[in-house]
Amino acid sequence: MASTQVTIAGIHFPSCVFNASGPRDVTLPELREIGASGSGAIVMKSCTPEPRDGNEEPRYADLPLGSINSMGLPNLGYTQYCEFPKDLAEYGKPVIASLAGMQPSDFPVLVEAFQKSDVDLIEVNLSCPNVKGKPQIGYDFEASDAILSLLDGLGDKPLGVKLPPYFDFVHFESMAAVLKKHKIAFITCVNSIGNALVIDAETERPVIRPKGGFGGLGGQYLKPTALANVRKFHELLGDRVQIIGVGGVYTGTDAFEFVLAGADAVQVGTAFMQEGLGCFARIDQELQAILDRKGYASAADAKGKLKAL
Ligand code: ERO
């Protein structure tokens, strides 16, 4: 059987298929369930300095080809997520912290705390689309650079950045130039497409309430954009930055496409919401079967092997 094990920033993952930071990884019981599942890692919900209830309901909706959400960063506050890795150690898989500051000065506080914790990797979310009045930092290259400058030298745990989707080659190049200035071990690409609007023609209303219905679009709608982002950043950053692909991974074929584009691993968001914990083992097995059929010994062997047409 082909191997789907992977090493990211020197940390071993039993599978390259694992959960995306999202609505089902907020509490310790939810994280324990992910630990006991086939997920190759435990990614925790993006956290802030203080606990947050998030936005008003309804704030998540399934769609024919994916999902829309405006959760608004509900989380228990970072001190809880610094403690959870001790409780999650028994599952023998990497624990990834995800953090999102409400202002630039929050980021070093959160990173420093996680550097002292038992988490294995730290994902800095520069792309939350749903906090009222706050822009997605990743679309402001100077602001992103300034925040990453505050994080340089804060510790030895591998640091990654969760990026928003980009749609223009100039923007890929601008963000790649920022990333090259800092010690970034991995990028997670991409977050949901921000500020989409889904309307129910029957009710003549949006399907979620916060922000007049504007929210982050995930699932199949996102996959071609996500693949393009993985591919472009792989071309621009080469082997110096590893890539975790996310956006519309429902099947082993989806995961294989991300690997061909240049991903080392994939995260599962909407499919996890819709199918539940069984999705990880299923996608992993489907990926193994495709790798076997195509003669790849491992997912790592297929990384970046997209052929020209
Ligand atoms: O609303 C959220 O909590 C949220 N939703 C997303 O689609 N992406 C995020 O990064 C995020 C919060 C950080």
Image (cartoon, rainbow, N blue to C red):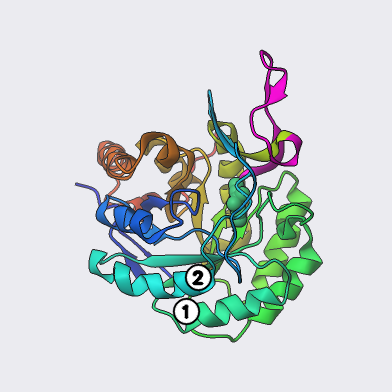
**In the rendered image, which residue does mark 1 sit on?**
157
Q: Position of residue 236 (x, y in %)?
A: 63, 59
Few, some or many residues within 10 Å of mark 1 (<14, 14–19, 20+): some
Drawn side of residue 141 relative to residue 151, left or right:
right
Ranked by sequence position, the earlier of labels 1 and 2 is: 2
Q: Residue furthest left?
A: 1
Drawn side of residue 265 relative to residue 238, left or right:
left
Residue type at mark 1 is Lys
State the extent of the magenta-drawn residues as a range.
190-212
Dot 1: element:
loop
Q: Does the beta carbon at disc 1 come under 8 Å from ligand 1?
A: no
Which image quarter: residue 124?
bottom right
Q: Position of residue 53 (x, y in %)?
A: 59, 55
Q: Are marks 1 and 2 in contact (CB under 8 Å)?
A: yes
Residue 261 is at least partly visible in this image: yes
Q: Which residue is drawn at the image coordinates 51% and 63% (left, top)? A: 76
Q: What is the tally of numbered marks visible in this picture?
A: 2
Dot 2: element:
strand
Which labelled disc corresponds to residue 138? none
Q: Position of residue 86 (x, y in %)?
A: 33, 75
Which labelled disc corresponds to residue 122? 2
Q: Position of residue 39 (x, y in %)?
A: 32, 52
| Of the pair 294 and 258, the residue shown nearer to us | 258
Residue 133 vertical position relative to residue 179 in the rendered view, above or below:
above
Residue type at mark 2 is Ile
Residue 95 vertical position relative to residue 201 in the rendered view, above or below:
below
Residue 124 vertical position relative to residue 292 in the rendered view, above or below:
below
Quadrant assignment for the C terminus: top right
| Of the pair 70 and 1, the residue shown nearer to us | 70
Q: Is residue 213 magenta?
A: no
Drawn side of residue 63 relative to residue 208, left or right:
left
